[in-house]
Image (cartoon, rainbow, N blue to C red):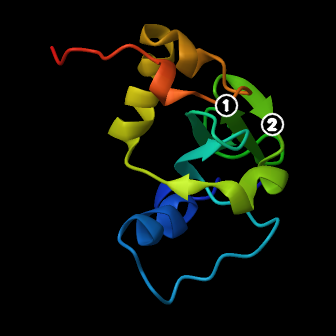
Amino acid sequence: MRQPTSRSDLYRHYWRALEGDPTLEVHDGEPHCGWYKTKLVTGGPWVPVEIRMLQVTDDNGELTEPERMVCTVAGERRNAASMWTFLEPIPRAEHDALMTRKDQIPAMAATKAPMKLSKMPMMRPK
């Protein structure tokens, strides 16, 4: 068996993207682990995306099956490779805020419908 890929290797591309590394190359269909946001429709709300590696290990820490990339878009599983070029890296705190915002603002829960911000009532800051 083999050892799982280290967390630092899995998230290296994500951390470089967050830092704005100008030499970072992004290739279509080659996703990397991290926290992102995207819009599912033009004019729609930002939707949180998490890409992680599923690693099943035994008691010795060795992989018992191949590593699998898992992409979760607003709570739904999606193909990471097909979503990859539409994702924008964000800090994990912003990802978590997007997750809670869809519960607080009904228009944010309709991820596949454009938002009409001019029709939304003003919200007071807490």
> Which residue is found at the position 84% from the left and 53% from the top?
82
Amino acid at the residue labelled 1: Pro
Assign a secondary structure to mark 1: loop
Left or right position of 42 against 120? right
Left or right position of 6 against 18? right
Give residue 51's quadrant in the image.
top right
Determine which of the numbered discs, if any, sits on residue 54 in the image: none
Residue furthest to the left in view is 126
Residue on which disc 2 sits: 78
Residue on which disc 1 sits: 114
Residue 97, position as x, y percentages in the image? 38, 28
Residue furthest to the bottom in view is 23
Residue 7, position as x, y percentages in the image? 50, 55
Residue 95, position as x, y percentages in the image? 44, 36
Toward the viewer: 37 or 62?
A: 37
> Which residue is found at the position 74% from the left and 27% from the top?
112
Toward the viewer: 34 or 88?
A: 88
Assign a secondary structure to mark 2: strand
Q: Is residue 3 visible?
A: no
Q: Quadrant of the C terminus?
A: top left
Give residue 84's quadrant in the image.
bottom right
Amino acid at the residue labelled 2: Arg
> Which residue is found at the position 35% from the left and 70% from the top?
19
Q: Is residue 49 visible?
A: yes
All told, the count of numbered labels is 2
Compared to residue 20, the image places residue 64 above or below, namely above
Q: Residues within 10 Å of mark 2 (few under 14, many from 20)?
A: some
Alpha carbons under labels 2 and 1: distance apart = 20 Å
* N-terminal label among 2 and 1: 2
